Image (spheres, rainbow, N blue to C red):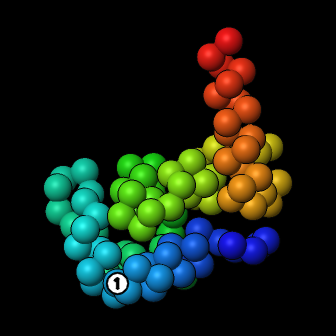
Amino acid sequence: MTEGKTLGKVISEARKAKGMNQKELAASVRREDGESISPQYLNDLEHDRRVPSSEIALQLASVLGLHPDYLLYLARKWPDDLTDRGLQPEQFEKAMMAFRKQLSR
């Protein structure tokens, strides 16, 4: 992934890499009420018109094989001083590992 990718772009690229269409991916992600998200909602996410809840972002990460912390980062579910840095997936993962290591001390 290159610098400047948005949440929507990352979801879209990962979905296409898995050979899924929007309808298939939408059917595999559940809202709090247990119903699938709509293909239109997924389209809105992929075009950065909406931001998913943390739970939906985590489900998308799981289905698409993406690092969940990084998808939450792109969804701006982390503090602004961290999300405004434009980190690449590898940089973010390294920062999270260091953070978790500090917490475990």
Residue 80 visible in image? no
Q: Position of residue 13 (x, y in %)?
A: 53, 81
Give 2 or 40, whichever is nearer the viewer: 2
Quadrant of res 25 = bottom left
**Badge 1: how crowded within 10 Å, few (<14), some, or many (20+)?**
some
Q: Is residue 43 above or below residue 91?
A: below
Q: Is residue 25 left or right of residue 27?
A: right
Q: Is residue 97 above or below residue 50?
A: above
Q: Position of residue 64 (x, y in %)?
A: 42, 67
Residue 5 visible in image? yes
Q: Position of residue 85 (x, y in %)?
A: 82, 54
Q: Is residue 100 above or below residue 24?
A: above
Q: Residue at x 74, y 41 (%)?
A: 95
Total residue callouts:
1
Q: Position of residue 58 (x, y in %)?
A: 42, 52
Q: Which residue is mark 1?
A: 20
